[in-house]
Amino acid sequence: MTHNLQQHARRILACRTRTQFFCSYTNKTLSSPVTNLTLHCRIEAALPGEIPTLLEQWRQQQQHGKQLNPSLVRSILEKLHDSHRFREALEVSNWMIEQNICKLIPQDFTTRFHLIEKVLGFKEAEKFFESIPENQRSESIYNSLLRSYAKRSGKHDLDKAESIFKKMRELGLLLRLSPYSSMTSLYRRNPHENRDKVDEILKEMKESNIELDSITVNNVLRVYADVSDVKTMEKFLADWEETTRRDGLTVLDMARAYLRTCSKEKARKFLRRTDELISPKSYEELIRLYGEVGEREDVYRIWNLYNKSRNKDNEGFLVSIGSLLKLDDIKGAEEIYYKHWECSGLEFDIRIPTMLMSSYRDKGMVEKADKLTNKIMGNARLVRPITPLLEELGEKGNEVKPSDLRDLIKTLCDSNQFSKALEASTWMGEKKLFNLFPQDYATRLYVIKNVLGLEEAEKFFERSIPKNKKDYHVYATLLSCYTRSNKTLDKAEAIFEKMSELGFLSTPFPLNSMICLYSRLGKRNKVDNLLMKVKEMNIELDNLAMNNVLRVYADETDINTMEKFKRECEDDKNLGLEMGTVEAVAKAYERAGLILEAIEITRSTNEVQRLWNEYKEKAKAEVKIDEENPWKTIGGISNEDNRRVISSLLKLNDVKGAEEIYGEWEPQGPLFDSRIPCLLISHYCEHGDEMKVREVVNSSIKKRKLMKFKMVKEDLSLFGTKCLGYSILAAMLWWAVLDPVAFLVFHKNIYG
């Protein structure tokens, strides 16, 4: 979308020269400068794919048997390239070659190489280079290829770059700084293997009187720093310190070199002298280096800068806390951990609390360490294994409380961290630190099912749970594993029967679970049988079961049973309808032709609008003429219909939809139904919208007057019709008296 907006913006800008733009289509005898300007405007406004067509049209208009001036095409290419419209520029280059517009020069090949690399990737650009004739490979195309290799880091790229560099030396093309700079960038990637090659490059540059630039100086400094050749590094720096600027990464590499050679004092002085060169991206490494040289104040100084930046991540906190712990500043580390990292919203990283916890233990602060251990094991963001942390508790000889471990497992399960819960549960079973209860086995059965699958859970139930531990909790857990899948009905029924034999059906869970399973499978008879059993045992259905039963009745469009069950649930229990249940009930009402009932229960404003439109069409088709009063109609949309749909929309907070229906409402007499405007008035009063209240009051007055006017009109029509009827009857009687024979003949012809 952004790209399209940019293209449309270019169209608008191009149309600032609207006169010339349109003239290009009507006047083929324009002068060259104007025509060129028009072509630039068209190209600027063109979308991808349109440019070759525009160029061809332009060529046909302008050529007149003459050779085109290629400089104009090259200028278009340059402008597109400079504005980063690389794909369009490549289209121009393709057209220029395909149409043989001009004889290509080396610069054309270089430009095309850049465009292919930008649009199609380096591999295609490399293929293009190979296709360029040897005599057309200029210094610029070789330099472009070398720069591309310098951006890459593969071993083969270095080999290829060295081959190109050697070729340039043979051709005498090493005339400028660019190829040397590219090679030092490549050698810096692996300084230990290429240190000697860097020295050779410097020697060759000196012999050729080629001055180094800042990039090359920084590359060389970083190579010497990486190999810890501090003496050569300092000597080289002395030669170039006054004329070139070091970048932040070079500063950090040089400081590391001093630290590796145990020159902390030099590293400290060097960092203080140059840390103003460090960008925010390098704050983390600067904090680490100051921590290593033992400067606590500098750690805090850079930390404060880092804390204000927007690029904080776990690595930064890890380095900052680690540096303070190295400096024995545990209070400072705690402050960063608890006040900044915990509330940072970053992804949980176990290394950070583990580092602080280990420091606590090293200093004998066991209580703090245990508290932090329990906290991090229960953290929902922890993704690494927690078994090492549990092992550490055992190794330290600390007493592990059963209640704490069970609370931890429950917390992990509640936060859906089943893998960690299984780790903790397995560790608890293997260590045998205390006796296990049936609930412990039930919990482990549950997490095994969620982590390893149903088959492994069944194996655990059969092989690992002692018979005397298989109580209600264990069986209920296994039943829940079966009732969650529609494919394990037989196993669920078998466990349900087993629980019935063992007397484990006195609680609501087993019956509710089976009702849910049967409901999902649409087994209406079995649902009804279990509901009877629920009533006999005086067991309450849970909300999930009630919703499932309602969906069964709704799917069968059994409206009476559905409504009866819904009323019972609403009277006896706090029924909360799920969205799926609402949709099923609404569809049942719609299938049964009870559109207004469907409107009242649905929770979707779109559905209300759809159903209301359907209802209006149906009502319109059912409108009839009143035989007794032909000027009146029977049926249509009633006041009550409007009231119900407006009320439904307001409940869904669709005020605009309610207003639209109110605006369409035509009151049906003889009494004005004030409940309808009052719905909107009540809503506006709740939100303190006095202006809207006045609008509805005024509109309701107008609607009432219009209704009265229509009623008076109908009464007058009735009176007029009756008067006309009486006049016709009197005339017929008078005719019968005056000429009975003629009247009888007329009557016989009309009525037979």
Image (spheres, helix red, strand yellow):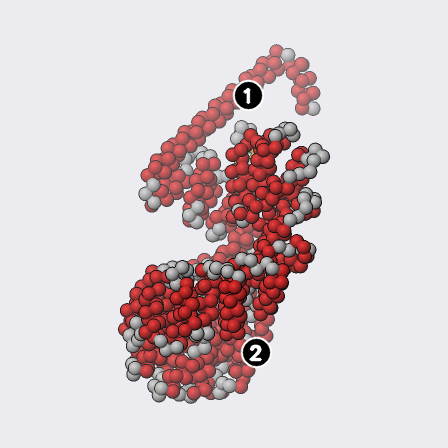
Q: Position of residue 220 (x, y in %)?
A: 47, 67
Marks 1/2: CA–CA distance: 89 Å
In the rendered image, the quadrant that contains the C terminus is top right
Residue 678 seen from this side: yes
Taking depth in this image into account, of 237 and 291 the one nearest to the observer is: 237
Question: Which residue is under mark 1?
Answer: 725
Q: Residues within 10 Å of mark 1 (few under 14, many from 20)?
A: few
User: Of 337 and 641, which appears nearest the observer?
Assistant: 337
> Where is residue 85 shown, x and y percent of the image?
56, 48
Above or below, 673 against 255 in this view is above
Q: For the point 52% across and 30% down, which residue is it? A: 632
Measured along the vertical axis of the image, is residue 600 above or below residue 301?
above
Seen from the viewer's position, the closer of residues 327 and 262 is 262
The residue positioned 45% from the left and 64% from the top of the image is: 218
**Residue 122 shows up from this direction:** no
* Picture residue at 45% right of the left edge, 63% below the top: 217
Q: Disc 2 on helix, strand or loop?
A: helix
Question: SS for tag 1?
Answer: helix
Instruction: Give percent across and percent down for residue 17.
Output: 53, 33
Q: Is residue 229 left or right of residue 361?
A: right
Find the residue positioned furthest to the top. 738
Which numbered tag is attached to residue 455?
Answer: 2
Which badge, 1 or 2, comes first in the chain's sequence? Answer: 2
Taking depth in this image into account, of 377 and 550 the one nearest to the observer is 377
Left or right placement of residue 747 versus residue 664 in this view? right
Q: Residues within 10 Å of mark 2 (few under 14, many from 20)?
A: few
